[in-house]
Each structure stands twice: as C-alpha cells, then as structure tokens.
Image (tube, grey):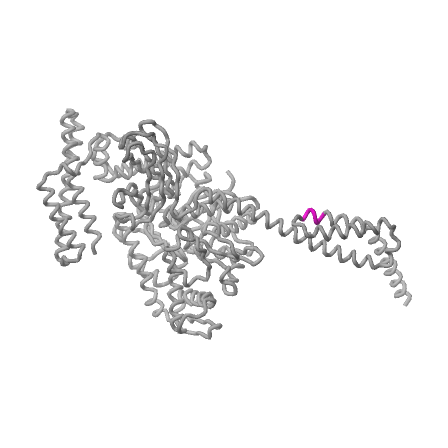
Amino acid sequence: MNYFEVFGLPKILGIDLARLERKFHELSRKYHPDFFTASSTEEKLQALHMTALVNDAYRTLRHPVRRVEYLLDVEGFKPDGSKVPKSFLMEMFEINEQVEEAHSGSATPEQISALRHDIENRAARFDSQIEAASAEWDRLVSNHATEPELKAQLSRLTEILSESSYIRNLERDLEGTA
Amino acid sequence: MSKIVGIDLGTTNSLVAIVENGVPRVLPGRDGSKLVPSVIHFEEGGEVLVGNTAKARLIENPKNTIFSIKRFMGKGLEDVRDDLPLLPFEVSSDSEHIIRLKIFGRDYTPPQLSALILKELKRNAEAELGEEVVNAVITVPAYFNDAQRQATKDAGRIAGLDVLRIVNEPTAASLAYGLNERQHGTIAVFDFGGGTFDISILKLSEGIFEVLATSGDTHLGGDDIDELLIRLVMKEIGGAPDASAIPSIRKAVNKAKEDLSAADSAEIVIESLGYRRKLPRAEFNALIDPIVERTLKPCRQALQDAGLKPDAINEVVMVGGSTRIPLVRERVQAMFGRVPHTELNPDEVVALGAAVQADILGGGKRDMLLLDVTPLSLGIETMGGVISKIIPRNSTIPASATEMFTTFVEGQTNVKIHVLQGERELVKDCRSLAQFDLKNIPPMPAGMPRIEVKFLIDADGILNVSAQEQRTNKYQSIEVKPTYGLTDEQVEGMILESFEYAESDIEARQVIEARNEAELVLNATEKGLHDEHLSQLSDEERAEITAAVTHLKEAMKSESHTVIREAIDRLSAGTQHLAELIMNSTIQKALKDKRVREIQ
C-alpha cells in the first residue's frame, strides 16, 4: 500500500491539509497500538506496523516537498544532482564558497546577512516553482493527459527538486554559523 | 486484564498511581507518604532500604546511599565525568559504556538500582491494592534517547514488571491536567524536574493529544542548581572540605533553595561546618539565571519545529519540582506571554498522567489518544563518517524507514550498519545507538544483494530492526550490539540474579534464625544436665541427650536451615522427659511457696 492509498487519495499533489489531518486522526483511532494491549502478539504487531505506515504517510504527505519526492519515488523517478545544468552548478559553487567563508569567520556580519537573504530568496523561488509544477501535475491528471505528457511533467518536477536540493543543503550549511 | 499502574520514576522522587472509577490517584507507601524519594541505601549485611528510610541515611553513610541514579541511565563514564567530583559514589573501573557503582564489593548498573526503586513502588501498590501488580506504564523525560528509554524498560523487567508502555513525562502530565475539557487548542508543557528538562508542544483536538514538537536537555534540573550552590559554599569555606561534608552541604543548600520559593530571603546553615550565610532571592536569581536561561533555548527550538509563534500557545502547563522557583515562572510567563498553569501538584501530575495512560491501555478509555513523537533524528553512518538521516526528529511514533543495503566485495556475507541519534551531520557529533551485523548474506557479486532493512521506532520510542534480502526473500539474522546499554542476555542474567539473591537472602536469614534457636536449646539442655532430676532418666535417655547435643553442635555448622532444624527437633524430643520432670517439680515448688504465703 503506498502513502496515497493509505489515506484513500488519488496520486495528486494538491492536498487539503485539514482533511488530511481528520483522516489521520480517524486512522490513528482505528490502528493505534494503545488499543491492542490485550490482543494477540500477531494483532499487536499488525497494529504497530499499520500505525507506523499511517504516521510515515502523514509525515510525508503533509509536507509539500516530501510529498513531491514521494510521488517521484513511487513513479520511479529519482532526483539526480549530476544532471543539473553547468551554469547552475557554477552559481551554486560560488555561493558555497561564500558559505565556507562565513564558516571560517572571514566574512563580515553584513556579508553573512546578505548571503542568507540571497539563499532564502532562491529557496522561495524554488518553492513557488514546485508549487506551480505540482498544480500543473494535478491539472494533467484530472484532464486524463496522455502517458508521455505525464512523464514529461514528472521529469520537470525531478529537475526542479534536483536543483532545489542544492539550495536546501546550502541553507542548512549556513544555519550552522552563528 | 489485571490492573495496570502508572509509575513516575523520577530523579528525586518516584510515585505510583492508578485510575479507579475513572479518577487517577497516587498510591501512598507503607509510611503514608506519596513521594518515595529515589534514594537507595545498602546496609552492610545486604539489606536494602528505599525511599524515606534510605534518604535519612544520606548524611551518615553517603558512600552506600545512592541518589539521582536516573542521571546515569543509558550513560557511559565520559558522559557523567563532570558530576562525579561532587558525588560520593564509588565507580567501578568497568564503566566505559555503562556506569557501574561499586557497593560492598558488588557492581550495580543504573537499571539494577532503578529496579530497586520500582520494586518498592510495586510493593507499595500491592499493599495498597491488596493484589499482585505486574503491569505498568513508566514515564521518562521526553528528550530521553533510545539507550535511556531501553535502560528504563530493562529496570522494569529486572523489577519483575511487565512494562506495557514508556510514556513521555510532559505528555503524561497533559493527560492528567484534564485539558481535554478543551476541545481544541495548543498547549506547551514545561517540565523542569530534579535532573531533566523537557518542553513539549501539543495540539489538542477532540480527545487526540498530538505532540507537534519536543525538545529538552536530559542533564538540566534542580540538581544543577544545588551543585551551583554547593560550589558557592565550598568557595566561601575556602578550599575543598572533606568529601564527607558534601552531603550536609547538599542538604542545607537544597533547603535554602526550597525556602526561596516562598520567602524573599533564606539562610544556608551547616552546623557541622560552623557555616551560616544569608541568601537573598535577588542573589539566588542572579546565580541561577544561566540555568533558567538554558531552558528557554529548547522552548524556542520546539516552537520553531512546530511552526508556531509563542502567541499561538493557548495554555502553558508547569510540571516538575523546579517549576516552583519564582524566577522560572517569571521567565516562562515572559516567553509565552501568559500565566502558566500551576494548579496541580507539580510533583504528582506526571504519575497521575501515567495512570491515565495505563487506563487507556487497559481499555478503560477509548476517547483519549496520545500521539507522541521521537525527540531525536535517527540516522545511519555512511561513507566518510557522515550521517544519513532516515527518521527526522519530531516524527509521530511508531515511525519507520526502509533502507536498501548491498555488498562492496564479491562473496561478502556480512554488512555492518551503525545507527545513531542526533541532529548533527557527522558521526562523531551524534550519539551512537547500536551496531548491527547483517549476517548470512548469500554470496553474490559485489552490489548484487539487495538487503532491505526496516528501522522501526515503536510507541515507546525504542528502535527495532528487521531485514530481508530481496532476491532470496530471506530474513536476515541481526545481532544488536547496543552501544550504551545492556544486551538482552545481560538483562536476563540480572533478572535471574535478582531472584537468586532474593532466594539466597531468605535462605541466609532462615539459617541465622535456626542457629539462634539451636543456641537457646543447647543452653537450656546444658542447664538441665546439671539438674538433680537427671538421675531419674534411664541410661538410654541420657545417652540419647548426649548424642543429640553433639549432633546439633555439628549441624549448626551447616548452611542449611532444615539440617539444623532436624537436629533441634531430635534434641527437643530427647530432652522432653527431663523437661517434664523439671517442669513438674517447678510447679510443685511454686504451689508449695504459694501455700506458705497463704498461710502467712
């Protein structure tokens, strides 16, 4: 059972979070190990694994990026950092040097603040790209688009995720500096 | 299902509670006190005292009186090195990954010592309820890692308890607070106890208590404030006093600290050292400010992880004895912008909540459900000492992750996996949890085997691992080597040992009692053998008495009380006739005397 099926959802990316939460509570009440204390070992184990699955699915589906990553995984697409354009890699390389300077203490607080601002802006741009591409995926699905059309959109999503993972790593690296 | 109790196994005090007719109540000990001090005292002869009686021996016999053992749970020597100078305990040399305290030449691990406290609570509950108690829910700080949780579970097993669930203390407290009256809302539970600090942010909706984020410090509590004050006193006395003075100093500063929760000024008085000093609250506040400040960083972290601003919190609940400190209350109020709840006794609320969770597990309540999270990210070691996170912190538990492993060398049949907990990127900065060996992998070319390993954090927050080779569909045998814990075999050994000791203790006592009785019988016989009535016995009777005396004297050297008792019985039988004769003459004499007195 994949995560979408656990929640009785079609494989679309626009998810109503309030409804998702209600369903999460409903499934928790049904399967949680707390309610199987007096059951057989086998039933207990089943409750444990079922609840873990529900929790894993909820954790993944309620997060807009993890949700996309999961869809790509289910569809057999893997974000691949080596396929991003060279020009983009060069840009990332430059930002990475600035992050390293911030770590080594040779950057001024103003430089660090400007760097943080730059990275945040780029991350926000990726977020809106992911959002737009996700909406496009949903539109294609509801219009019963052809297989090649759907595959093309999944490739598009894979590209965006591959690129955005660089920025997310840089963001995390910068967090480590005061 | 038989009754399930809720246990708060605290750093300073421990409690046991149960829900009866829907209402949780703390079960008092035999001395009537609800709080059982988490103190264990060992007597020279092997007797063990727990609770108030043990606490009373802290000053006169500090070396054999153990306190705050919770701070050592799941810890190695390096972790607690800073604490040791102020603690009177003798640490065994074999303590690298599990602390072992040496008491009268025997080594005790923290789970074994905690088990003694749990046994006391079990006995108290049994005495109060009038039936055997086996099932329990035990609470732990929310920020406890895997090893600390496992150590707590091990302690339960050693104490003869079936630990049905490990529950986080702040979440247990939220269950006790009756906050479910409120249908929806967001709550922060600020739990500052004797040894640990937790902050949990919960979302409430129609009986579901969903933890959004938790953070804390498992080495931050009232003990740290006491230590600060001990160091202050030591500095003022000038130079380090005799280590035996530390318990007196600890007791005095602890009293001053508690006094300051109600008064503006307190006094630290240590008569044995001739030391006396005023401690105004302002000075105390300035002193402890850095410690209180350390609680606020995890609060900010938890809010950030929950994606909330402080003003989104509807209620703040205070738990743990250290929340009685006025400065703590002030800071928490300032942080969240609202007056925190302090209605329930902060010492009891966790135990009451544990009882509520026990009631849920027992089938008493189905309308309430606690959804807790794992406090630390789970990761595995990859190439170059870097960690790959597989279950992020604040994931609702049970939670799982599946990873694929393969071999690097042709025909390789073993793969080593190192699991860690923590938020940092490098192996050296995280807490090693365990090493696993995937064994008996079918020999194949490098990279061919596909071994799917499932990491599952259960509802207790404890890791379980299972593996399957995809091509052969075979489950792999996994040998778990916990880095900071006891193996299953060690725990089993300790359970057996505790039974053996209990049995040998009873046996030893019975032997001593039998010997004492033999002593009395021999003395009485000795007297009888000088009595004038001895001449009235037959030769056979006299010979039997002599033989029985020799037999008993020999039997007394035995370590078996039944052997001694049999010899006592033989001598008693042999001397019965003589005893009757002596008795009769005594009675006759008494009657004669009586008559003489009556005549007078």
Q: Position of residue A150 (x, y in %)?
A: 16, 28
Q: Residue furthest front?
A: B410
Q: Tell me which segment is drawn in magenta.
A: B561-565
The foreground one among B464 and B293 is B464
Vertical placement of A83 versus B422: above or below?
Answer: above
B277 inside magenta stretch = no
The foreground one among B303 and B330 is B303
The foreground one among A93 and A61 is A93
The foreground one among A163 and B526 is B526
Vertical placement of B193 versus A5: above or below?
Answer: below
Mostly what secondary structure, the magenta segment? helix
| Res. A4 visible in picture | no
B563 inside magenta stretch = yes
Q: Position of residue A67 (x, y in %)?
A: 23, 37
Vertical placement of B261 versus B380: above or below?
Answer: below
What residue is at 73 percent from the left and 47 percent from the top? B566
Q: Could you tell whether B402 is left or right of B32 in the image?
A: left
Q: Residue furthest left?
A: A87
Q: Quadrant of the C terminus of chain B?
A: bottom right
| Res. B442 visible in picture | yes
Q: Position of residue A143 (x, y in %)?
A: 16, 26
Q: Position of residue B316 (x, y in %)?
A: 34, 53
Number of disc labels: 0
